[in-house]
């Protein structure tokens, strides 16, 4: 493994890149001067409408590098040929990184993270990010496999909070959570069938709260590496909560 | 005003009626033997498909009165000719009533209600009902004007909790909230611009939490009759929460 300072710096930079696509989302991102933009990608086939003209103007006013591609080249970058509308934008988000790097970095106080296991609805993902950010969670582990990915729908549902939230990427969730557990973090699966309640968890140790799929809950592979199972007590015989509501109740529990 | 016991009983019964429509929602309601059904309404023009046949079978097995109508008559009952699919069902929900009647009825302990002011998104309405029910709120005031109404989308988003939640109907919100305030209840507008936080409100007095429109917040007419303004403290410069998240944080604040 190459761990020269040069290599690590480069890796951290590439970990921080988020590629968004679609004319409206890209335009909105360029208009927000708080967002550090790395590069704009345009398809040669683009018909010049008002949005494209405005996008090009903004990029040149902000001195942003523009790369031109044929249709195929662009879809390799956007990874969504159907919805990219010939436009993609690399953001270099300071709060965007890898779960492994976070794990290796000494933290000043016991952290609290959410980890998402099979959250497939973009609306829910956006709402989770918004609520967790407002509640002050330290980060959200979002695996590349099995979850909705950050796309224009998610950005919209997050109402601007995506860019303020530490998003920690990994390929698969179970192996990463296992490493966190070995390093001493509590890894807690939320499940309505659990015996213990959320209240039993204090804030003296680093803790990861794992939220499972909207229908099937936390997967077996992930549940096997969890050190705790927790539920939120419910009244009136209600059996489950929307996953974004659960994320909010966890994130806000010290705050209000 | 007629307030003979006979009349009051009849009024309470009609207040408790909720008419739902659409073949799938009606079938699901008939299959749930916990739901007290008052009457089934069918349009004469219905093509007999599998769903209609099953609906008729269930209604006759449960000894439920069936009324037959022409297309126009049915749409007067469903109030949604576009989506009723020729089928409507009156439920007589024990937890469904009028806000005025609730106000006149002595309560054993200080109650906590939500009041909805201009919640127009059915998905949000369903999620509010689900979270409030799970959090143990005593009821939800839902005005007939300016809010999404209980329809199949809302029933679906409430995931079965609509039928367990006390829904209190009124025509307009402001006059009813004013009466609650005169009777000594705290009427609290949730607003991200408020000075006081949710935490400042104890549970020693009856309290109504007013949730405003997804974009514009609590309306001026309603805000004028509120006795308190409250906010939920947020981190990271986040400016607002989804209204269903706010409902959950309020409803669960004593519970977990």
Image (cartoon, coloured by chain):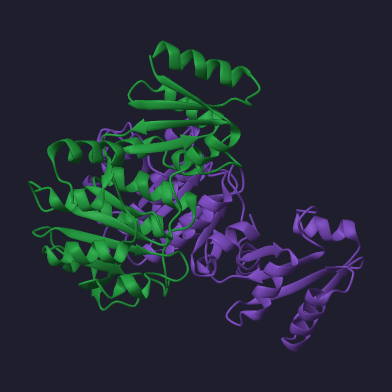
Chain colours: A purple, B green
Q: Position of residue A5 (x, y in %)?
A: 60, 69
Q: Is residue B187 above or below residue B91?
A: below
Between A14 and B252, which is closer to the camera in this rendering?
B252
Q: Position of residue A15 (x, y in %)?
A: 62, 62
In the figure, is residue B86 to the left or right of A129? Answer: right
Q: Position of residue A190 (x, y in %)?
A: 37, 41
Between A156 and B49, which is closer to the camera in this rendering?
B49
Q: Position of residue B223 (x, y in %)?
A: 30, 73
Q: Is residue B86 above or below residue A77?
A: above
In the figure, is residue A62 to the left or right of B84? Answer: right
Q: Residue at horizontal 77%, vertical 73%? A: A40
Between B41 and B94, which is closer to the camera in this rendering?
B41
Q: Residue at horizontal 82%, vertical 79%? A: A53
Total numbered labels placed on residues in the image = 0
Q: Residue at horizontal 22%, vertical 45%? A: A200
Between A231 and B14, which is closer to the camera in this rendering?
B14
Q: Is residue A123 above or below residue A232?
A: below
Residue furthest toward the top? B61
Confirm whether residue B138 shows in the render.
yes
Confirm whether residue A256 shows in the render.
no
């Amino acid at each position: 493994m190459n761990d020269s300072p040069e290599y690590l710096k480069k890796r951290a930079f590439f970990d921080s890149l988020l590629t968004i696509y679609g004319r409206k989302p890209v335009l909105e991102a360029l208009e927000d001067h708080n967002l550090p933009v790395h590069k704009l990608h345009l398809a040669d086939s683009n018909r010049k409408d008002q949005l494209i003209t405005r996008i090009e103007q903004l990029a040149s006013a902000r001195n942003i590098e523009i790369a031109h591609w044929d249709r195929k080249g662009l879809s390799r970058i956007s990874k969504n040929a159907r919805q990219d509308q010939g436009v993609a934008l690399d953001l270099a988000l300071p709060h965007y990184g890898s779960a492994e790097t976070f794990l290796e970095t000494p933290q000043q106080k016991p952290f609290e993270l959410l980890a998402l296991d099979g959250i497939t609805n973009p609306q829910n993902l956006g709402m989770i990010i918004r609520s967790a950010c407002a509640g002050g969670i330290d980060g959200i582990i979002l695996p590349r496999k099995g979850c909705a990915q950050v796309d224009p729908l998610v950005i919209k549902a997050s109402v601007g909070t995506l860019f303020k939230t530490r998003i920690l990427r990994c390929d698969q969730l179970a192996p990463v959570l296992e490493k966190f557990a070995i390093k001493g973090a509590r890894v807690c699966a939320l499940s309505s069938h659990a015996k213990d309640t959320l209240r039993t968890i204090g804030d003296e140790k680093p803790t990861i709260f794992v939220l499972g799929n909207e229908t099937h809950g936390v997967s077996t592979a992930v549940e096997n590496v969890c050190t705790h199972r927790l539920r939120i007590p419910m009244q009136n015989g209600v059996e489950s909560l929307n996953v974004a509501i659960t994320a909010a109740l966890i994130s806000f529990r010290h705050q209000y």
